[in-house]
Image (cartoon, rainbow, N blue to C red):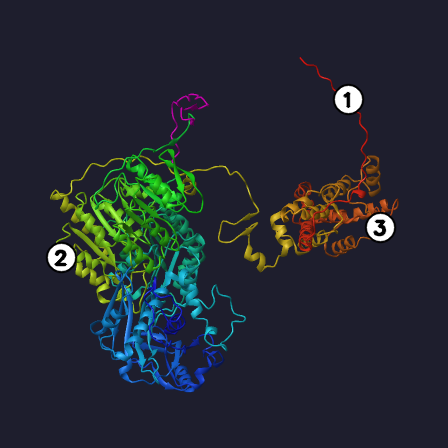
Amino acid sequence: MSAKPIREYDAKLLLAYHLERAPAVDASAQIATKFVYPSVKVAQVSWDPTTGAITPDTQLPGWVFNTKLVVKPDQLIKRRGKAGLLALNKTWEEAKEWISQRAGKAQKVESVTGTLNNFILEPFLPHPSDTEYYVCITSAREGDAILFTHEGGVDIGDVDAKALTLNIPVGSQFPSREVVASTLLKHVPAAKKETLVDFLIRLYSVYVDLHFAYLEINPLICLDGVNGGSPTIYYLDMAAKLDQTAESICGPKWAIARDLSVYESQAVTSKGKSVSADRGPPMVWPAPFGRDLTKEEAYIQKLDGSTGASLKLTVLRPEGRIWTMVAGGGASVVYSDAIAAHGFAHELANYGEYSGAPTEGQTYEYAKTIIDLITRGQPHPEGKILIIGGGIANFTNVAATFKGIIRALKEYKSPLINHKVRIYVRRGGPNYQEGLKAMRLLGESLGVPIKVYGPDTHITEIVPLALGITSKHKNALHSIPPTPAPASPKSQAHEPVAVAEPTVGSIHPSGERTQPNDQIVRFDNVETTQRPSYRPFDASTRSFVYGLQPRAIQGMLDFDYSCGRANPSVAAMIYPFGGHHIQKFYWGTKETLLPVYTSIADAVKKHPDVDVLVNFASSRSVYSSTLETLEFPQIKAIALIAEGVPERHAREILHLAAKKQVLIIGPATVGGIKPGCFRIGNSGGMMDNIISSKLYRAGSVGYVSKSGGMSNELNNILSLVTNGTYEGIAIGGDRYPGSTFIDHLLRYEQDPECKMLVLLGEVGGIEEYRVIEAVKKGIIKKPIVAWAIGTCAKMFATEVQFGHAGSMANSDMETADAKNAAMRAAGFIVPDTFEDLPEVLKQTYERLVANGTIQPKPEREPPVIPMDYKWAQELGLIRKPAAFISTISDERGQELLYAGMRISDVFKEDIGLGGVVSLLWFKRRLPPWATKFIEMVLMLTADHGPAVSGAMNTIVATRAGKDLISSLASGLLTIGSRFGGALDEAAAMFSGARDTGLTPREFVDNSRKANKLISGIGHKIKSVNNPDLRVELVKEYVRKNFPSHSLLDYALAVEKVTTAKKDTLILNVDGCIAVCFVDLLRDSGAFTPDEADEYIKIGTLNGLFVLGRSIGFIGHHLDQKRLRAPLYRHPADDIFINMADVAQPRVLGKMQ
């Protein structure tokens, strides 16, 4: 939802802070009096359900305690005074008592019951009744309107009838002061007019700057000036809505107004509180009164806010028997409608939807939340029903999202059985066969009945089946049969003999070389044709795609090829960030090249034949990119795919486009499709759905819908009961789509090839009534089948925001029932329910065929489009050997895994760095004494002073100005058999000697005879009498903690032999670590003897030294940088230079 109500407290803070600061809405809109801006005096008192206490006095501003107060609930409740929820002229103690008596208690307001938990405090303002006014600013498609009446207050009555209205069309200048006064302030005393004009100018400036969608003040108080001063303004009651999609623009402005330190120096500080992105806390979006968010709803709301996908959940009746888990905004409404239409609205437990290709992990969390709610409490005697429904997806991998649902179902196997839950599944879209097969197999193993249906079943046909309604189905049910195993490829009796082709290509006069196997298809000369205005797309339409969208573009080209188009519909891409380049795409079995430009201007200049732009820019940049596009008269149609476009931006775009006669489709749309001609982005779904819905050739039925998912359903239904779709447009679910139902239906009416119209409307908005007027006036004469979804809305006790931003009724005429009744009365063909839509379409089509209006054509087989390798691999249709094999970590799932251990468990079990090394190096958990030893080795080997070769190399490289990585690499490259790399060799020598049965003395003697030094023995400084404390620490730890240390004992016996000759031939730290690590590998019980030997051979011990010493090398690099050490040059007197005289023989050459 875009226009969302906010608390009165927040609305008054926004107005108080920005009334003086907001930029003027127009250069001429300036204040002309000594306007006195209202001071900020508003406080909030909340009830904490966990403690049962209200906001403590210490967190309230000082004026509360010495001022008479007004107190009222601040929970989007209308007519609080008439409901007895208003206390006037109270001291703080009296107000506090009034709040305490009501906080946390259930309160019925008209037909809604909710808990009072939030209150607003303001100073009590005595005033004469004739100083009360009413002002309201609203937004509509055409522009904004300011409503004003000189009679405000509780008994204002019918505002629409009494208020004077000043309309401000989109794109127009703000009216002059004289126009404002003469239009709105006719009945206001002259002394107050100028002040009120100033206030209205500033109020509207704030309204525009902060992206308000609605702002009402009643009463607005204007008191006479005192001692010759200007009149003063106060606003008592206020109701407001903000455009939530504008948060990326206005978030900082909303937040700073909610920062209480701006208004009062003694306000509570935020010490110890979380840091927000802006100065001040972010805007709060309260739930409607009576609809306090449950813990589960809040969790899904948080999940939704952290993903690009859409996840919605509203719990209607926790004890309800019928639960839904529906994919798609439009589909979710249709399922709720069907349940209500069958008389089961009182048992519907929830409303919700998931869409936008959520990940497996997100779908799992969503499904787990719903299933947990289903399986709470006592089992229902009749059992419970879970409907996992959805339309035909455009690009969501159905099998992938079902994996998350299946995980959740498996996790709740026993509770599902205990609660006798029956599950009904209906879905279509990419890879739906595998997804439904997985669901069917799950039902066989889970012990929970699961019925599975695909797109050949009408979208809501499973609802009566689930509810046990045995009425005759007008649309045949088709359950998905078991998926057969793929057949073996047929062998060829006679394989053709391959003819060798030359491997060298030919060079053309242009200088271009082509190879014999060159598969690139070029479309250099593209002919353009003139199209009538009612037909913006045909088989020669060429487009730009704004944004790097290779998947969508490949889908468009595959569609073009299946339609038999002569040229691709995409001429080029526009991507401002990557520089000019070329990208390669498939054209059937061959390939073609598409240029990528960094600006629209460059693209338009190079491709004069293009007149359509498919804009995939994000909600933050779609506004600027579309305004730029509208500067080029060549572009005649623009599709805006992005969701979350601020409403004010959307209105500006649509009005500017109307002036320039440019067709806008969207925003928040999947686009549209002209079968046999042109496809916008992902419209129509994957190629298997394109083929099954016969979208590769034109039908006779033109439709318009808000929902992209429901557009796919219409394509599917029309292919089953008519000769298919002629053109279909999804205008998008926002409040202000660039084009509306009537725009497209008028085009279809003019197009002689389109014989029958379909309108799929929904609750909210009044666009269907424009079509009704056109039918009544005879402008639209072709038969039109129509239905407005959202008939279930009347069944809900509180407001429920459906899947689309515009799908909420703000008046009786905006309800789905009212629309369906009005359309039926105007002569539309309206079914009794959405389930009857296919039958009504079939009857209408057959009537048109019978009277000769439609003449069916023979079907043609579309060309076979090869499946993309990646998609075929995802479907499991092909296999390919992996180029790399990794067995130690995996980041592909919801959580990073180290050797199968979740990263959260790594910290939860506190396995430490040694534990992480054991997982990633050895693929297993080692006992604590072993992981502690690994950490001990890393600490002991971290550094050995600046003089050793590795540290010196690091220092010299650093002082030469090299970066950390280069300096570290310089030091690491010195590690080898002479420095640091003795661990591997020492381990091999000691273990080899002991394993072959040599005594320590024999080992020493054999090494001497072979003129071979024993690695790990000897030190330049340390000796028997001056032992290396590092070695002593290792020996002490090993003897105390290792279960066995036989090789260490053997090495110490060798040390006794060598030190008898010279006292510095001790077991050094490298040798001690090496033999102890061999003891760890062989005696920990975690490794087989072969595994232990392998780890010794493949460099594991040197890895420990490299890992540890990197710590010291990095330290030396940072130390030198910190000291700003200059370039190092070694002193010449420390180098012995011996330049021996070398007689250079003279070479004589002969001239030939």
Residue 474 can be seen, yes or no: no
In this view, the residue farthest toward the right is: 1061
Residue 1145 bears which disc, if any? 1
> 981 or 438, which lies in front?
981
Residue 473 point in image, percent of width and height? 22, 52
User: What is the chief secondary structure element of the magenta stretch?
Assistant: loop
Which of label 1 and label 3 is nearer to you? 1
Which residue does the numbered mark 3 point to in the structure image?
Answer: 1023
Q: Quadrant of residue 996?
A: top right
Mark 1 vs 3, N-terminal side:
3
> 795 or 593, which lies in front?
593
Residue 502 covered by magenta stretch: yes
Using residue 1135 as the reference point, say whether residue 782 is left or right of it. left
Using residue 416 as the reference point, say whether residue 538 is left or right of it. left
Query: Neighbour class for label 1 at 10 Å: few (<14), some, many (≥20)?
Result: few
Query: Neighbour class for label 2 at 10 Å: few (<14), some, many (≥20)?
Result: some
Mark 2 vs 3, N-terminal side:
2
Q: Is residue 979 above or below residue 1027?
A: above
Dots 2 and 1: beta carbons under 8 Å? Answer: no
Which residue does the numbered mark 2 point to in the structure image?
Answer: 776
Circle 1 SS class: loop
Task: Give the spatial CA distance, label 1 vs label 3.
Answer: 54 Å
Q: Quadrant of residue 563?
A: top left
Q: Amino acid at mark 3?
A: Ser
Circle 3 SS class: loop
Q: Is residue 579 above or below residue 8?
A: above
Specify start and end residues of the magenta stretch as a single range.
Answer: 486-514
Residue 997 can be seen, yes or no: yes
Q: Amino acid at mark 2?
A: Lys
